[in-house]
Amino acid sequence: MNKSFLAFIICLITSAFAYSQPCNINSSVVSSGLMYPPADSLPCVEQGSAYNSSIQINMPSIFHGILTLDSLFIDSIAGLPAGITWGSNPSSPFVLYGDSSGCIAFSGNTIDSSGNYPLTFYCHAAVTGQSAGTENLSYQQLSQISDAPIPYYNLNVILHGDSCHGPQTETGISLIPGALNWNLYHNPIPDGNFQLSVTNNLVGSELEMFDVAGKLIYQSIIRTQLSEIELNLVPGIYFARIHSANSSMVKKLIKL
């Protein structure tokens, strides 16, 4: 076969493969957290018009020297407006390994009513810990362990001619800005006891404690700004969640 013709065929195949990808991985935002861009910066979906936007997922391989990431699977994404679909790079099945990145694209044309459409990511990660062996964690649990919370993305549908102000609300657990209003001491903790410090506006809120698998292990009402919490914890990773009047906030706790 003529070498120039062979080179043309290879170039054509390569170009077709690149074109078939719904989104491209941007190496310049790999250090920007688990998901980029921020949740409130996705463009709005204009009713009746073609839509195309994407987010990037950046997975580290080691979390605090405790957990090793084996793999992340994204099975499906729910909550999309009718007519909007998602594709990914790598394509189905969407699988990422430690120190790798992927992207998810949203595209299509919707006639759904205007408003916010919260997205739910159905995914799990296989991680290996020093004491617990290999476990499957939800993506939300994984984000909390790595201190890089996953944004709760919405697609905001607007009418033709309306201005895009972005999502007005978030769903799920929010770690910011309320996370600045409370703290856990000492963390990591050497024994089963720790102190909870909150601002006055969080007194009367509910405190919950979960293990790394998401099982509720403690629940109480916060009575004072400084509380002593006594729990018989085995070494591992835990999550403390506070329900206030208008938000739900999570922090990670490590028991040595």
Image (cartoon, rainbow, N blue to C red):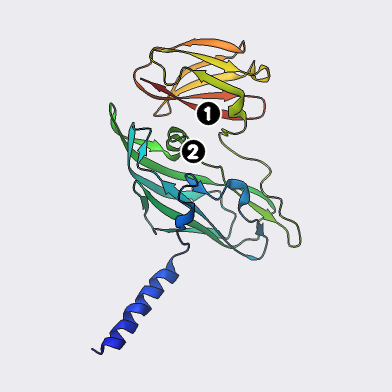
Q: Is residue 202 above or below residue 146?
A: above
Q: Is residue 201 above or below residue 147?
A: above
- Label 2: how many Cα within 10 Å (few below 14, some 14–19, many 20+): some
Image quarter where the N terminus lies is: bottom left
The residue drawn where x is 59% and y is 34% is 176
Where is mark 1, residue-wise?
250
Answer left or right for 154 relative to 70.
right
Q: Position of residue 90 (x, y in %)?
A: 39, 58
Where is mark 2, residue-wise?
148
Q: Secondary structure at mark 1?
A: strand
Disc 2 to disc 1, how far (Cα)?
12 Å
Q: Amino acid at mark 2?
A: Ala
- Label 1: how many Cα within 10 Å (few below 14, some 14–19, many 20+): many
Residue projecting furthest to the left: 1
Q: Earlier in the sequence, mark 2 or mark 1?
A: 2
Q: Position of residue 9 (x, y in %)?
A: 33, 82
Residue projecting furthest to the bottom: 2
Q: Is residue 228 above or below residue 98?
A: above
Q: Nearer the viewer, mark 2 or mark 1?
A: 2
Answer left or right for 236 relative to 172.
left
The residue drawn where x is 45% and y is 44% is 122
